Amino acid sequence: MRAQTSLPAVGIAFLLLTGTLVVGVLSAEAALRGADRQALDRRAAVGLSETLVRAEAPVTERQNVLNESALANLTATDLRNRYGLPQEASVRITLDGRTLVTDGPPKNGITFERTVLLERSRLRTLEPSFEGTRSVTIPRRTTSLNLTLRPPVNTTMRTVRVNGRVRLHNASGLNGTYEVPVTTVETARLRFEAVGPLSDGSVVIRYEPVRTEKGRLAVTVDG
Amino acid sequence: MDRGQLPLTIIEAALGVLLLVGVAVTFALGVPAAPTQEAQLDVYAADAATLLANEPPRHGEETRLRELVASVSAFEREGPELARRVERVLPPNVLFRVETEYGTVGHRLPAGVPTGTATVTTTEGTVTIRVWYA
């Protein structure tokens, strides 16, 4: 009699316990897997950001100095094949809040921020007018100057000096395009020594000064 | 006696359910949070150190950091300017301190905050950059 009445209770108790056990195991599994995934995402994000700013990376000039045009050509395929991003992970890379690459897109994931410098070079042209002087000071420092010398017909340009040192010399006259290496340690001051008049357009100087700007590269990876 | 038997089993089952729920809750809460913050701070410090270490000096020596630790007078001359530079390099929500053998520049380090550290070794001495969230 006693066993008879408690049988339904035992059944209910078993059901309850089994149900709770199943729910408990499932939630524990989910929690552990979530923690694993977060660790993996973090490692992937750190690794990817580290590879992107390395001195050897295709998008950098030096360590932590990015080349902006190379960065603009970056694709998600590059990230997977060359920068060690896991194949199935979704990714977003932003520079100062502007999205460069997005694939997935990641729903949450882990974000890592890097402080970088952006290097921009822009071609500038200088045409000295040679009014009262035959010297030109290059306004910004650069590593190389491209000189196009087209002196007037009755003028012989013999020498070009950079900060007093002879860089180009031809006794019978310079005419054409020349590359003159200069240093960024001092401001370049060019002096053109010619027999005869020089005017607008006799000399065209092209140079590419480099400007660096601070930027913030954010890498988000969601595995 | 006969009536008391049935609730006893139910009470036992309820206790078992409580125990299992307790274990499950421990799993849900007890998984340690990933130390993303510290890793990010270390990265900030390392990036700032890299950028400063590659910057040209303002007066002498080879790099800016080497110039800083060249002598006491060099440190006093370059320190404030370096602090301004570090402040510009780091994100606005991060505070910093630069430690050298001649002294420190930057903010006062509060107790008990997670920090990120990067050390640069130069031929003149070492420079340590410590950062933390404001």
Image (cartoon, coloured by chain):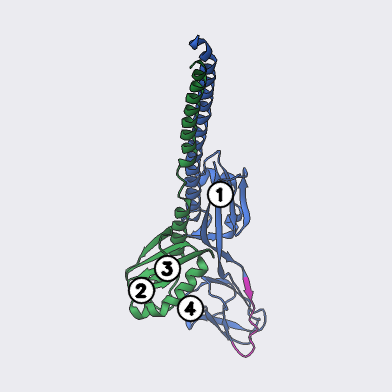
Chain colours: A blue, B green
* CB-based contact (under 8 Å), mark 4 and mark 3: no
Q: Secondary structure at mark 3?
A: strand
Looking at the rendered structure, whether the residues under marks 2 and 3 are on a common chain is answered as yes
Specify few, some or many for label 1: CA neighbours under 10 Å numbering under 14, 14-19, or 20 or more: many
Give the chain of mark 3: B
Question: Residue A21: x and y, percent?
Answer: 50, 26
Q: Is residue B10 above or below residue B61?
A: above
Q: Which residue is mark 3?
A: B97
Q: Which residue is mark 2?
A: B103
Identified at 67% across, 81% down, the residue is A200
How far apart, in angstroms, are the residues tagged by discs 1 and 3? Answer: 28 Å
Question: Residue A19: x and y, percent?
Answer: 54, 25
Residue that sits furthest to the bottom in the current view: A132
Residue that sits furthest to the front in the current view: B1
Give the chain of mark 2: B
Q: Is residue B78 in view?
A: yes
Residue that sits furthest to the right in the current view: A200
How far apart, in angstroms, are the residues tagged by discs 4 and 3? Answer: 33 Å
Looking at the rendered structure, whether the residues under marks 2 and 1 are on a common chain is answered as no
Q: Name the side, left or right, on which A125 lies relative to B109.
A: right
How far apart, in angstroms, are the residues tagged by discs 2 and 3? Answer: 10 Å
Q: Which residue is mark 4?
A: A186
Identified at 52% across, 69% down, the residue is B88
Q: Is residue A149 above or below residue A117?
A: below
Q: Nearer the viewer, residue A154 or A96?
A: A96
Specify few, some or many for label 2: CA neighbours under 10 Å numbering under 14, 14-19, or 20 or more: few
Single out the mark in the foreground, 4 or 1.
1
Magenta range is: A124-133
Give the chain of mark 1: A
